[in-house]
Amino acid sequence: MASAAGVASADVPAAPFGGAPEVPIWKRVEAHGYVDVYAAYNANRPADGASFLPGTGTTAKRAGEIGLGQAALGVSLDPAPVGFNLTLHVGSGATILHEAEPVGPGLGPGAWNLVQRATVAGKVPIGRGLIVEAGIMPSHLGFEGYASQGNWSYTRSWMAEYSPYFQTGVRLEYEVAPAFTAGLYLVNGWQTVGDVNRGKSVGARLAYEGERLIVAIAGLAGPEQPNDDTSVRAIADLHAVVKATGWLRLAAAVDVGVDHRSPSRALVPGEDAAAGVPSAAGWYGVAGYARAAVLPFLSVAARGEVFGDPRGAVSAYGQRIVEGTFTLEGRPHEAIVIKLEGRYDRSTTPVFGLSRLLASATPDRGRDQALVVLGAVARF
């Protein structure tokens, strides 16, 4: 009679060349997902029910109602040596994420709204192992990501909303030394699956992740104007996280960008309309963060930010926005994240929807907005 150990080893095929036994691929595939719902109150009571600016608000977009931010379901396999990740999603955040998709044969928001991530990956046995991944993947830029449960706040900063959350192309990533990782990226463009021209964007990232300090610097540059292969949009991103004590984390982030030939924007107050579109328009963002663990299941976080877009390069309004957010986070179970958040935004230009309708049946605009948001995420 075979021993228990003999039976177990007989179920696992031997690895080639006499190495360790291989675990069948179907046993290494992992399922994951989450559901993110929210209730939001906007003191402006915007007539169209929308908080934030057009093209932004990937969390808590709808005011005065209970909404589904996003629900995601996926499967993944670590590249050992070959893997994949397929994650599908629905919700208001998913719709906004793909709002800028170019329209054409096989292209458009309707073709990609359900896809959050779809990649194939491989690990090449060079040195510590070179990761090669291709497809629709998370962006290499920024401190705040697309999934709200991974961020310190529920709503996201303006600098996050005006930089890509995902990109489509190829990435190469390599651990150059313990705690140091470098990456190179060749992508279609700025948060799109399809491309708006025949050019490609090139990016890079260098990150250090130690026990008490995380620092990452990244950039992306390439042509992003429709049917224009030469006018370049470029962004540089730097963020750092410090583990100040066992219960306190501090972080800071800086973005600086420039866009040549912005095709549509509101003129800066006092600017002559005859001047036309400037040859280059820049923007910037600066944010500071703090997160404190009050109890094992309860934490508080704060964010302060200044976002400047003087010529409407990415927001379509010549403006500067000052934003402050305070978040109370509870985790009654490892699979549940609940965030209660207060947020105030003030712009130098009237950009936030009001309850009054203009003669054109569009909402009047004000310079500020105050939000209270309750968000809940269940994940597995």
Image (cartoon, grey):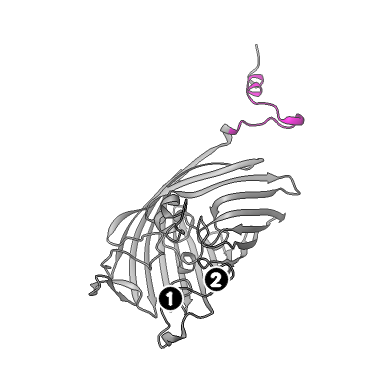
- Residue type at mark 1 is Arg
Residue contact between numbered discs 2 and 1, judged by CB atoms under 8 Å: no
Residue range highlighted in magenta: 6-25
Label 1 environment density (alpha carbons within 10 Å; few <14, some 14–19, many ≥20):
some
Provide the residue designation for mark 1: 265
Q: Position of residue 47 (x, y in %)?
A: 25, 67
Q: Position of residue 24 (x, y in %)?
A: 61, 30
- Which residue is rendered at x = 38% and y = 66% of the image? 54
Visible residue check, residue 210: no
Element under disc 1: loop
166 up-or-down from 253: above or below: above
Identify the image quadrant of the N terminus. Answer: top right
Residue furthest toward the top?
A: 1
For marks 2 and 1, give the CA distance: 20 Å
Element under disc 2: strand
Label 2 environment density (alpha carbons within 10 Å; few <14, some 14–19, many ≥20):
many
Q: Position of residue 210 (x, y in %)?
A: 65, 58
227 up-or-down from 379: above or below: below
Residue 17 falls inside the magenta stretch: yes
Q: Which residue is nearer to you in this view: 117 or 2?
A: 117
Mark whose residue sits in front, 2 or 1 = 1
Provide the residue designation for mark 2: 255
- Which residue is rendered at x = 41% and y = 76% of the image? 317
- Residue type at mark 2 is Asp
Visible residue check, residue 70: yes
Q: Residue 81 sits in which quadrant?
A: top right
